[in-house]
Image (cartoon, helix red, strand yellow):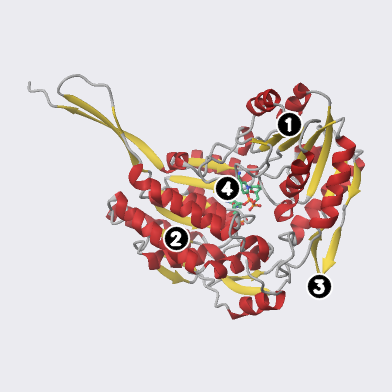
Amino acid sequence: MTNRTRSDWQAFADSLSIEGRAFIGGQCVDALSGAVTDNVNPATGAVTVQVASCDERDVDLAVASAREAFEKGEWRKLAPAKRKAVLLRWADLIEQHWEELAMLESLDTGKPIACTMDDDGGDVHSSIRTLRWTAECIDKLYGETTPHEQDTLGIVSREPVGVVAAIMPWNYPLATTMWKLAPALGAGNSVVLKPASLTPLTAIKIALLADKAGLPAGVLNVITGPGARLGKALGLHMDVDCIGFTGSTPIGKELLKYSGESNLKLIFNELGGKSANIIFADANLDKAIPSSAAAIFFNSGQTCSAGSRLLVHEDVHDEVVRRLTEVAESTWQPGHPMDPNTLMGPMISTSQLKTVQSYVDLAQEEGARVVCGGSSVSIDGCDLYYKPTILCDVRNDMRVAQEEIFGPVLCVIKFKTAEEAIALANDCIYGLSGAVWTENLRTAHKVATEMRTGNVNVNAYFGADNQISMPFGGFRQTGNGRDKSIHAFDEYTVLKGIWFDFRQA
Ligand code: NAP
């Protein structure tokens, strides 16, 4: 990063001029109703900016603008290499504004500046990598010719699906948004982006930069406001062809209903998780312990792929819990996001904090033991910080082991055999991520292949998440979507077969 201090970062934040209007048809616009809402910094409670509070009429406008751009074809019909050039210019502009974007992400989410500015796995740099990597694919995606007889020809090509709505969560706003925008735009679609109402700032900023990079007006639109209104209107809209959704499982289910009630638009859901992180007795604990702590405490546990269920072999259980507690208490104590030494900031909102506390209370009622943490802490007058928390004596059938807490709360569960660990890992409605720690290759292979989850790491935790070349998505009630990698294009393209018959009658 740099050696800037908390007051340097604060001064930088204060110097920013922040856009809070929606972006429709290539222009920043107020909501048609003129309504606005306060965008609040969770770390201070201060209002960062007022943001347009759109309604159904703004949705119609944004969808019409996207449809018009799609039909006009200025973007869709552009040569793939030229679309690539625009997206690469966009990536360059994002890079030029990376500190501003990282600061917006911190102000919006309360994430530590050390995380959003991190030039390896940080929010902005990972988004730039996603955009560049995906843009580079555009002119390398080939179609097919089918087996055919003499004087005939069958070709199978991929066409953009049309108007894509991207509905996004608040936990990794920029990174997850770019996972959708890069392939959706790269494939030639027009997009209506609906960021989470708590975290709209980077979405607006990157849309302005896309415009500057030469993306034609109407190809990328951003509408801001409550999901219950806008997300529903997009879900039910007859002129939206596809929704790329990242968020909670209940809302993912709603979207499938909206699709059935309207035009059968494609729905790709990237939903919740309760991932199992499995430590065997022969694991390299020097590597497993810090990684397992980061797996649950990074971003205050507000991570879909967090390693929130720690399955530990009984022979190393006590040592693992002791060492994890030491790491939690030394490395992961919450702090102010603008302090460059902070690794864990506040929770996003009071309601999220209350949810976390209610799960910790419930865990104790269900018989679990709080080994460390278990309560919130106030920092500089803000009460939204939650201590890194480890719960022991957890059974897999307890609600805290089955439901997504979305906070820095680790549930530790003992096991005896690999078969038992696999059964525990799979006894869950979700299936997003997970890990297995062992020096035994056969055990690693057996467990990794038998876990019913979209990603498994062997002797790492967020390894797969950090690779743009790996698909990201889940099994079961984590949904059907796949972000990242070449497979992301599958969501935003439809297959077309064209049959030529060259024979004379
Ligand atoms: P959420 O409450 O489901 O909200 C996600 C988005 O849906 C927001 O933009 C929200 O708008 C909108 N929305 C709300 N009600 C809607 C409705 N009735 N119809 C359509 N859209 C609606 O999720 P969240 O709390 O923002 O994010 C946390 C969840 O996301 C967790 O479950 C986490 O596991 C999941 N997640 C999954 C992945 C993955 O890749 N699998 C990645 C990150 C997060 P408002 O913000 O205005 O309410």
Figure label count: 4
Element at badge 4? strand
Nearest to viewer (mark 2 / mark 1): 1
Rendered location of residue 47, percent (x, y): 66, 74
Residue type for callout 1: Thr
- Residue holding disc 1: 438
- Residue holding disc 2: 91
Q: Please report whichever mark, 2 or 3, sits nearer to the chain's N-terminal start.
A: 2
Element at badge 2? helix
Real-space Cα separation, disc 2 to disc 1, in angstroms: 39 Å
Residue type for callout 2: Ala
Circles 2 and 4, Cβ within 8 Å, touching? The answer is: no
Q: Residue furthest left?
A: 505
Nearest to viewer (mark 2 / mark 3): 2
Q: Please report whichever mark, 3 or 4, sits nearer to the chain's N-terminal start.
A: 4
Mark 2 crowd level (few <14, some 14–19, many ≥20, 10 Å Cα):
many
Residue type for callout 3: Asp
- Frontmost residue, 245 versus 113: 113
Residue type for callout 4: Thr
124 vs 456, left or right, is left
User: Which residue corresponds to the image point at 81% horizontal and 34% vertical from the top-left?
Assistant: 312
Real-space Cα separation, disc 3 to disc 4, in angstroms: 32 Å
The residue at label 4 has a CB less than 8 Å from ligand 1: yes
Real-space Cα separation, disc 2 to disc 4, in angstroms: 22 Å
